[in-house]
Image: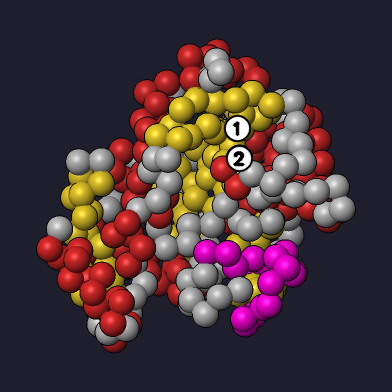
Amino acid sequence: MKNKLFIRILNKTGLLKFLCFNTRVVINDKEIIIPILSSTGFGHLNMTEMWMIDLLKKLFNKFPDIQGFMDIGSNIGQTLIKLKSVNAKIPYIGFDPNPQCVAYVQRLIHVNRWSNTHVVALGISDHNHLAKLQMYTPSITDKAASIIQEFRRQTIYEEFFVPVFDFETIYQSFDKFFPGIVKIDVEGAEWYVLKSFNPYLEKHKPLILIEILPVYNEHNKSRLEIQNKIESLLKQSGYEIYRIEKKRVKFMGLVPLDRIGIHDRLDWTDYLLIHSSQRDFIKDLISRD
């Protein structure tokens, strides 16, 4: 506690950005080493979205044969830390187009000595190309950054080219890695990722944890069009949509949806996608409210 307080004081005074060191936090009763690299990693001292830990526990319990976890949009390892606090031995591969994020996650993996854990500096899309990654804040690891041009109605702070590949191209490089859970958090590029994954979805039926940001209103035609494409692809692939219900840090249950719909609720952006053949495994997680 004293250590956290001291680091917060360093951050508030602006001194933290000049320092690099490791600290430790306890998450889900597991001690995790957190690198602080010129302020990057500071957010891990006050971890958000802790409901994911409870959800991951339940999913691993109900699907004990899960062999791997793939993280599309790993940023600085927020999901990786939660995952390793639940199951330190699960094989993990993360992808992020921002090389600054990947450098941090590689350090995070190294200091914690996590085995079978890798991160790759590229994005996933429906074809191989160079994309522009647009940054909306001065942070070099901006978690709102997107390869979808002008996805946010904000001033673009900076942009640079990054490599993106379709899933089939990269999957050939990972021998005997079968992700039973795929997490997708790609700031507007969800449809392109799902389109690229579609043959794998139909064959292996992984669980998908996905963030889909709100359409807000019917006038936001670009977001609505992409959301409609996502719903159509999932229906064709036999997938069902469940909104993840949470209250503060707690997972409360799953709400089955026919459609995501038009809304402006930022607490309605996290979903579990599951193949219809597996729905019975999660029936006791469905919210009855």
112 is higher (above) or lower (below) than 288: below
Where is residue 245 shown, x and y percent of the image?
Answer: 53, 32
| Residue that lies at the very extreme toward the left in this rendered image | 2
131 is higher (above) or lower (below) than 66: below
- Of the two numbered discs 2 and 1 on the same chain, state the one appearing first in sequence: 1
Residue 67 picture quarter: top left
Disc sitting over residue 268 in the figure: 2
The answer to whether 70 appears left or right of 16 in the picture is: right
Whether residue 146 is visible here, answered yes or no, is: yes
Residue 106 picture quarter: bottom left
Residue 88 picture quarter: top left
Disc sitting over residue 243 in the figure: 1
Whether residue 148 is visible here, answered yes or no, is: no
Where is residue 27 shown, x and y percent of the image?
Answer: 25, 46
Q: CA distance from mark 2 to mark 1?
A: 7 Å
Query: Magenta span: helix, strand or loop, mainly?
Result: loop
Asked if the magenta segment contains residue 34, the reply would be: no
Q: Which residues are magenta?
A: 143-163
